[in-house]
Structure formats: C-alpha cells, structure tokens
Amino acid sequence: MQARRMARELALLGLSQLPEKPGKLVMQDFEKLLLAAVQTLTTEAKDALETASDELKRGNQHLVDSGTRASDVEKGRAMVEAAIALTQAAINRLAHAVELPEFIRLSNQSEIEAFALELLSNTAKHQTQVDTILDEVMVAWNLKRLARIDRDILRLAVVEMHYLGTPDRVAINEAVELAKRYSDDDGFRFINGVLRRVVTRGEAEAGVEESGAAVDGSVV
C-alpha cells in the first residue's frame, strides 16, 4: 500500500476520534494517531456485529412466524443475508485493525507519519474555510447533515487540493477510494460530485481573478 494512501486512511480514522470543533483537531504524536485509527476500526466492527445480531434475530423470528407464506419467507431470508453481510464487514474491519500497525511497520513509516500529521494539522488550521467552501457547493444540502465519515473525507480532500498542492484529480480519486471503503453504497458518488463542484468553483474564481488582473493591467 502506498505511503500517502495509508497516511490518508490514518488521518481519516484519526479524525473520527477527535472533537468536531475547529482548532481542537490536534494529534500529539503518531502513536496516538495509530491508536485512534485502530479504535475507530474496532468500534465500527463492534457496531456492525451488534446490528448483524439484531438483524439475524429479526430474520430468524420472521422465518419462524412466516409459516408457508412465500413473501414472508423471502423477507426473512433477506434479513439473514443482510446480517451475514454485516458480519463479514465487521470481520474485515477487525482484520484491518489487527494488520494496520504491521502494514505501517513494513512501509515507509516516516513518510506515512509526516503526511498524516500534515493532513491533520492543516485540517485543524483551515477547517472553518474548508467547511465554508463545501457548504457553498452543495446543492440542497449542507455539511452538518452528512455522516461524520463523509464530512471528514471531503475535508481532507479539500485540504489536499487547496493547501497541500495535491492535484485535483488525485485528491478526488483518493477521496472516492476512501469513501468506497468507509462510506455507504452511494457515498463515493456523492463525494465525487461535491469535490468536482469544488474544483469548478475554484476554476471559476481563478478566471474572475485573471480577468480582473488583466483589466487592472490595462489601465495607464
């Protein structure tokens, strides 16, 4: 796994363990960031297993109560299948939590550490401005209504594009990959659309600035 991709993932997972309020997104050291990431993964796994357990119980009860009604049997089976899928997702999260420290040890840890902490420090420094940009480009929606994981993916991508010099295409692609891994089924499409509007907004503003500079330069 590429060092920067691992750093993005660590920053994202670390953000979910920190306060939402701008100015408080501070990680003291890399070990605490790694611990926060592992805690996020294990918490997600626990929540998924609890949901799967409830869904399995409901599905089983539905099958017991259904008798021979085909529609009810099908609904019960669907519940059980959903529980199995949730359980598999939880197992994957736990496996990743166990493997994450070893992945980092075998990778370029210094590069991972430097970029992850750079992402976090710039998110803390510029969160107010970044949130304003995101709110301005959303259509009939606002940042506060999004799931926390989607907000943080968007914030990290805008920080990369606006403050760290990451090419827009790269930042968007990496954000989409994070969303595919940690958001819901439609999350990555939504995030892709929002970030493309951020880019369009920036290009429009740059065009206005260039036009204004040309006008100013023509005045004797």
Image: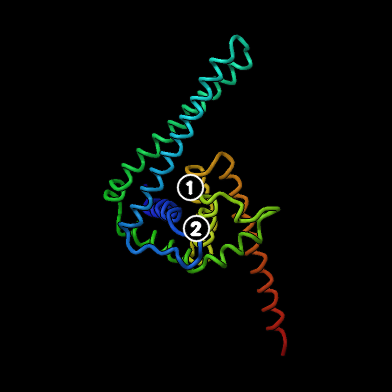
The answer to whether 77 is drawn above or below residue 11 in the figure is above
Q: Secondary structure at mark 2?
A: helix
Q: Position of residue 105 (x, y in %)?
A: 27, 50
Marker count (numbered): 2
**CB-based contact (under 8 Å), mark 1 and mark 2:** yes
Q: Residue furthest top?
A: 68
Towards the viewer: 18 or 164: 18
198 relative to 157 in the view: left or right: right
Q: Position of residue 4 (x, y in %)?
A: 40, 55
| Residue drawn at the location 37% of the way across and 48% of the way down | 39
Residue under label 2: 156
Query: Could you give the CA–CA distance between mark 1 and mark 2, rounded to whole angstroms?
Result: 11 Å
Amino acid bearing label 2 = Leu
| Residue drawn at the location 47% of the way across and 65% of the way down | 124
Residue 111: quadrant of the picture: bottom left
Q: Quadrant of the C terminus?
A: bottom right
Q: Residues within 10 Å of mark 1 (few under 14, many from 20)?
A: many
Q: Secondary structure at mark 1?
A: helix
The answer to whether 153 is drawn above or below residue 90 in the figure is below
Residue under label 1: 178
148 relative to 6 in the view: left or right: right
Amino acid bearing label 1 = Leu
